[in-house]
Image (cartoon, rainbow, N blue to C red):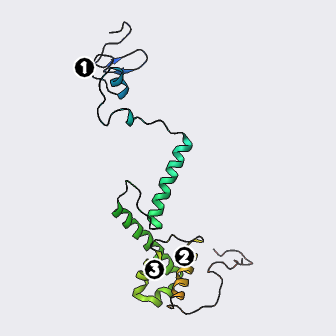
Amino acid sequence: MAPDAVPGDAAGRVREPGGHEGRAAAGGTPETAQEREAAGEPLEAGRGREDVREPETGDTAREALARAQEALMAALVAGQEAPRGFDRERLRIQETGLISKRRRTVARLRPDLAALLGDGFAGEFDAYARGRPKPPGGSHADARDFADRLRAAGRLPEEPVAPEPGSAPRRWSLFGRRR
């Protein structure tokens, strides 16, 4: 034992003055790949240098995370292939839930479409939304695009161009809000 070392515990660990503790210092079994390599022991499969990764810089880690998130979102909302490591069935269930949420919102914004299609509204909207992300412009644009698709298929009569719901300027009362 080193002259300035503290005696070890029952497992044979020794605390060196620098705060390092480990079995290799006490003559026990080396714990890390570096300790095993320094002790001249053969590296086991799956526990060698190939497992030791270089630390990623912040930008590289962020870029990798952004790519992974992009692939996951593409699988959920655009019908792309599931990223490696994700359960395809669970992603399909989540995709179905997101489409259902979009369908409910479009039915709330355009009750005339839901009434016109009746029981076929869910199937028609699901066919429209599967593999198609929500368009820029949000739910109102989604409802407009769905109606345009129905109109192009001849399932909806032509309608005059009207402003989007909620796009009219708000008018303030002379007396403000009522309490």
Seen in the picture, residue 157 relative to 55 is either above or below; the reply is below
Q: Which mark is residue 142?
A: 2
In the rendered image, residue 112, in percent from the top left (x then y), is placed at: 51, 88
Q: Secondary structure at mark 2?
A: helix
- Residue 10's tag is 1
Give residue 125's mark.
3
Q: Quadrant of residue 72?
A: bottom left
Q: Is tag 3's residue or tag 2's residue first in the polypeptide sequence?
A: 3
Q: Residue at x 56, y 71 (%)?
A: 135
Q: CA distance from mark 1 to mark 2?
A: 68 Å
- Residue 128 sits above or below residue 65 on the image: below
Q: Is residue 1 left or right of residue 145?
A: left
Which quadrant, please, contains the N terminus? top left
Left/right placement of residue 134 relative to residue 29 reads right
Residue 31 location, x and y as percent?
32, 27
Disc 1: CA contacts within 10 A as few (<14), some (14-19) or many (>=20): few
Q: Residue 104: x percent and y percent? A: 46, 77
Residue 88 occupies which quadrant of the picture? bottom left
Q: Residues within 10 Å of mark 3 (few under 14, many from 20)?
A: many
Residue contact at pointers 3 and 2, CB within 8 angstroms: no
